[in-house]
Amino acid sequence: MGKLVNGVWHDVWYETHSKGGEFVREDAGFRHWLTADGSAGPQGQPGFKAESGRYHLYVSLACPWAHRTMIFRQLKGLASHIGVSIVSAEMGEKGWVFSEPEPNYGFRFMHQLYTKAKPDYTGRVTVPVLWDTLTHTIVSNESSEIIRMLNAAFNDLTGNEDDYYPESLRRSIDTWNDFIYPSINNGVYRCGFATTQQAYEVAFYQLFAALDKLESHLEDSRYLVGNTLTEADWRLFTTLVRFDAVYVGHFKCNLKRIADYPNIQGYLKELYQYPGIAETVDFDHIKRHYYFSHTMINPTGIVPVGPMLDLTSPHGR
């Protein structure tokens, strides 16, 4: 819950807001690119070469953006090639912290990594972080771009050619991403972090209109893009899997639960049951982070015991 200003940590509210009380998410500050041969990224970003053991992911099990990267590390068989450090569920006045010193430098706070990469760094300290242990810097802290890198950069090392962003489907994938991000992925945060009734209600009704559209689409489509499982599905999944456990109550997204949408619920259960995915989900960690750490929303820090979630029974899809 804070940011670095001229290298000094300041305990400020978790995000920024417009004058109308609307939640505004800041852009990621590190946007380099990881490629098979170290060539530049698609927009000319400085390139880093994919090598086994060179890179390290810093994540929170609570954060849906970090969760994306953990899913792609799992899907692409990268567990033996990219190490992972997980921050504590409890975020305090020093921001993201490690329960034990992280393995590369013995740091206890995520903000130490940011100033290791850039001593004069000014800005928010976020997860995920894809770190280069060779040059001691942050490759990227933008999750949507990290998953694109993991999708392709290590194929020659792993032999895993699964492609969740195939060229023939990119236009459709991008269209879904552009729809889902503001209304659903970030929409739940726009509800939860709004500081005026009007800003909250605008985000609230946009969120549930988007879920209604999604429910209708999944009536006749197995995944977002027909019968092909793509990055758009996994980007959506990390929000859906947290929805009933956290967003309904904590973020006041309570018009309906995901369990009340038959098609979305079946879709969520299918993705949750996909090989290796359930082990990337930790509901205790998720609930503890949100309810304990967001003191502006939940000043008592009490973490709810429920709800009971049914994601392991047959999904019927």
Image: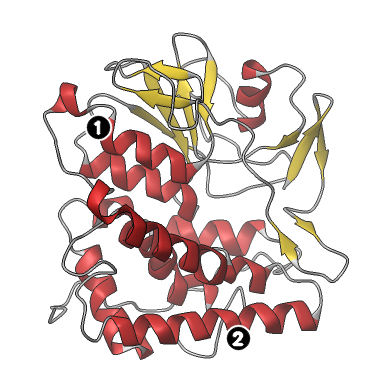
Tell me, for residue 110, which label it has, or none: none
Q: Quadrant of residue 56?
A: top left
- Note whether 138 is above or below 64 in the view shown: above
> Picture coordinates of residue 272 (x, y %)?
25, 64
User: Which element is circle 2 on?
Assistant: helix
Asked if 57 appears above or below 254 in the picture, the reply is: above
Circle 1: residue type = Ala
In this figure, which residue is indicated by the disc labeled 2?
205
Q: Circle 1 sits on which residue?
A: 79
Q: Residue 268 sits in which quadrant?
A: bottom left
Answer few, some or many: residues within 10 Å of disc 1's Cα (few below 14, many 20 plus, some between 14 and 19): some
Secondary structure found at label 1? loop
Front residue of 1 and 160:
160
Q: What amino acid is at disc 2?
A: Tyr
Find residue 110 and report its image quarter. top right
> Which residue is located at x 52 percent, y 35 percent?
99
